[in-house]
Image: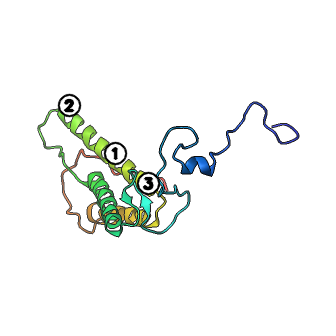
């Protein structure tokens, strides 16, 4: 940036005109624009008119699909906690170390993938999605990670370690 406030060598293209957006050309890109396009929020908002994970899902003005989306996000977060705190493989198991390692790796990949999907859903900035993700993780931890419902066992497990929280 020079002394008069201009950046040399870095030109920005102007946004497409409203006429170009309305006639479906999209500023010459050839893409058709939907007249009821969803706005991408960059701050938290409340409401059922949102897109979560997929374009057009749960849709515009569809309370039933929005509630279904919230239920799906809740159960994904709950399942992440299940995978994080459940024991599948015990030390007494006579399985091959390679088989155990592959099973652990598969479960780790599944847990990580689901955790990322929940994170991407929260990135819709919808307050309801944020709340059900937190409640799903919290109830999952209560059931699977806390001592409330745990049976004390004498055997060690070789299962997935809980996800660490760096907060």
Say if 104 sits above or below 44 in the image. Answer: above
Q: What residue would you read off at disc 1?
A: 113
Sequence-wise, which precedes: disc 1 or disc 2? 2
Q: Nearer the viewer, mark 1 or mark 2?
A: 1
Q: Residue at x 47, y 58 (%)?
A: 36
Say if 1 sits above or below 128 in the image. Answer: above
Q: Residue at x 23, y 35 (%)?
A: 102
Residue 164 spot, x, y in % from top left: 41, 51
Q: For mark 1, does the 10 Å Cα neighbourhood hold few (<14), some (14 to 19), or many (20 or more) residues? A: few
Q: For mark 3, does the 10 Å Cα neighbourhood hold few (<14), some (14 to 19), or many (20 or more) residues? A: few
For label 2, the SS is helix
The tag on residue 77 is none
Q: What residue would you read off at disc 3?
A: 165
Nearer to us in this view, 162 or 80: 80
Q: What residue would you read off at disc 2?
A: 98
C-alpha gap between disc 1 and disc 2: 22 Å
Nearer to us in this view, 132 or 93: 132
Q: Describe residue 82's horizontal placement relative to residue 61 as left or right.
A: left
Nearer to us in this view, 2 or 104: 2
Q: For mark 2, does the 10 Å Cα neighbourhood hold few (<14), some (14 to 19), or many (20 or more) residues? A: few
Residue 34 spot, x, y in % from top left: 46, 52
C-alpha gap between disc 3 and disc 1: 17 Å
Q: Quadrant of the N terminus?
A: top right
């Amino acid at each position: 940036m020079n002394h008069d406030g201009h950046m040399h060598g870095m030109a920005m293209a102007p946004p497409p005109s409203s006429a170009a957006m309305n006639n479906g050309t999209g500023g010459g890109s050839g893409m058709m624009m939907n007249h009821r396009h969803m706005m991408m929020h960059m701050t938290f908002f409340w409401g059922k008119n949102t897109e979560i994970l997929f374009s057009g899902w749960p849709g515009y003005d569809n309370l039933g699909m929005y509630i279904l989306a919230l239920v799906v996000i809740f159960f994904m977060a709950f399942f992440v906690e299940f995978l994080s705190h459940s024991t599948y493989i015990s030390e007494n198991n006579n399985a091959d170390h390679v088989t155990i390692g592959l099973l652990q790796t598969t479960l780790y990949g599944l847990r990580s993938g689901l955790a990322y999907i929940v994170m991407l859903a929260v990135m819709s900035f919808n307050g309801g999605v944020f709340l059900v993700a937190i409640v799903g993780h919290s109830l999952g931890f209560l059931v699977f990670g806390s001592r409330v419902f745990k049976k004390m066992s004498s055997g060690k497990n070789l299962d997935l370690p809980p996800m660490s929280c760096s907060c």
